[in-house]
Amino acid sequence: MDLTTQYLGLSLKNPLVAGAGPVTGKLDNIRRLEDLGAAAVVLPSIFEEQIAQEERLMLRLTTLGVDSCAEALSYFPSAAFYQTDPRRYLELLYRAIRAVDVPVIASLNGISDQGWIDYARQVEEAGASAIELNIYFIPADLQMTGSEVEHRYLSILSAVKQAVKIPVAVKLSPYFSAMGHMACQLVEAGANGLVLFNRFYEPDVDLTELQLLPNLELSTAAEIRLPLLWIGLLSGRIRASLAASSGVETEDEVIKYLLAGADVVMTTSALLKHGVRYVKVLLEGLKDWLSSRDLDSLEGIRGRLSQCSVSDPTAFERANYIKILQGYDEDR
Ligand SMILES: Cc1cc2nc3c(=O)[nH]c(=O)nc-3n(C[C@H](O)[C@H](O)[C@H](O)COP(=O)(O)O)c2cc1C
């Protein structure tokens, strides 16, 4: 069966990608993910704050205490402190690339276009197949306008694109007043792909202690609806790859995303829940489903239910909502 797909100009053996998260942060897991069938691996993000911290440290090392030898020693951080995450990240990337044949995608998580872009170059030099740029920005400043937020995304992307030649995918949130136009602007600014969507950390409330609870829930299949909507709306209408990220619990979600038009489907929570071997379960499920319909490649299904392809394009829009509500009235 031919499950091959193209993502960011890379040829992948199938559409299942291990998404950014703790599972892909370990070399052993990356090896096993490849063995079990994952077509590519996205490493967990390295954060702008971590890179900036290392740069501040380097500045301290190169500028402080140069003329006071005895005291200078106390400025020197311990070896453990010096081993900050950005170095370990590059090391993981470097080792992963050598350990597996599938593409390894680095993930940079930033909110400004200054100070850390050089790191994108280092990621490219280490051999990453592509960069996933996770712009995790919550516009908590009430004075900030929508166009300022959009400008920030575009200027971060432009800065990274200027720094590297490898493909860059933008992982973004759905919270734009004109998501479709934002997607077009990102593609115009050079995005080779869009990852839909980023999942923002949202605090919960502890009703006993009356405190905010900083926990991170794993996703459920109910969460595919919003990315499914936007993949369906964008598929065939933008010149960039589309990756689905959110809510893959079973092969059903993988198939639905492909039908909507995703080029690849990423999974993170399911791997955390069931372990890396779940990649194989999802892939076998996809193959069985295709076989049960006498299909021997993805071509017959990819984008078949995108807005461009369905006979009633309003199925994605307001008119359908009104139809559904009318149905509720009639049922009562
Ligand atoms: C524990 C955990 C850690 C994550 N870490 C990252 C990360 O480092 N970078 C990133 O872009 N996304 C990260 N994500 C988000 C996932 O890559 C993914 O976009 C999101 O969880 C939705 O996909 P899922 O439903 O398959 O989990 C993380 C998610 C979880 C649950």
Image (spheres, rainbow, N blue to C red):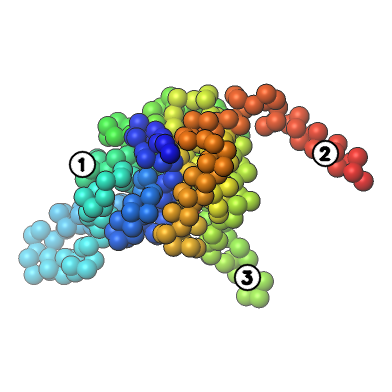
Report whether 298 appears left or right of 227: left
**Residue sitting at x 67%, y 32%:** 316
Residue 218 can be seen in this image? yes
Report whether 114 appears left or right of 240: left
Q: Residue furthest bottom?
A: 208
The residue type indicated by label 1 comes to Glu
Q: 124 or 12: which is nearer to us?
A: 12
Image coordinates of residue 23 in percent, x first then y, are 39, 59
Foreground mark, 2 or 3?
2
Foreground mark, 1 or 2?
2
Report whether 105 appears left or right of 178: left
Marks 3 and 1, Cα distance to the nearest angstrom? 45 Å
Mark 3 Cα shell of 10 Å, populated few (<14), some (14-19), many (≥20): few
Residue 325: assigned label: 2
The residue type indicated by label 3 comes to Asp
Secondary structure of the residue carrying tag 2 is helix
Compared with 79, 231 (above or below) is above
Image coordinates of residue 100 in percent, x first then y, are 26, 50
Sequence-wise, the earlier of marks 2 and 3 is 3
Q: Quadrant of residue 103?
A: top left
**Residue sitting at x 48%, y 55%:** 281
Report whether 279 appears left or right of 220: left
Image coordinates of residue 126 in percent, x first then y, are 21, 45
The residue type indicated by label 2 comes to Leu
Secondary structure of the residue carrying tag 1 is helix
Residue tagged 1: 125
Residue tagged 3: 206
Sequence-wise, the earlier of marks 3 and 1 is 1
Sequence-wise, the earlier of marks 1 and 2 is 1
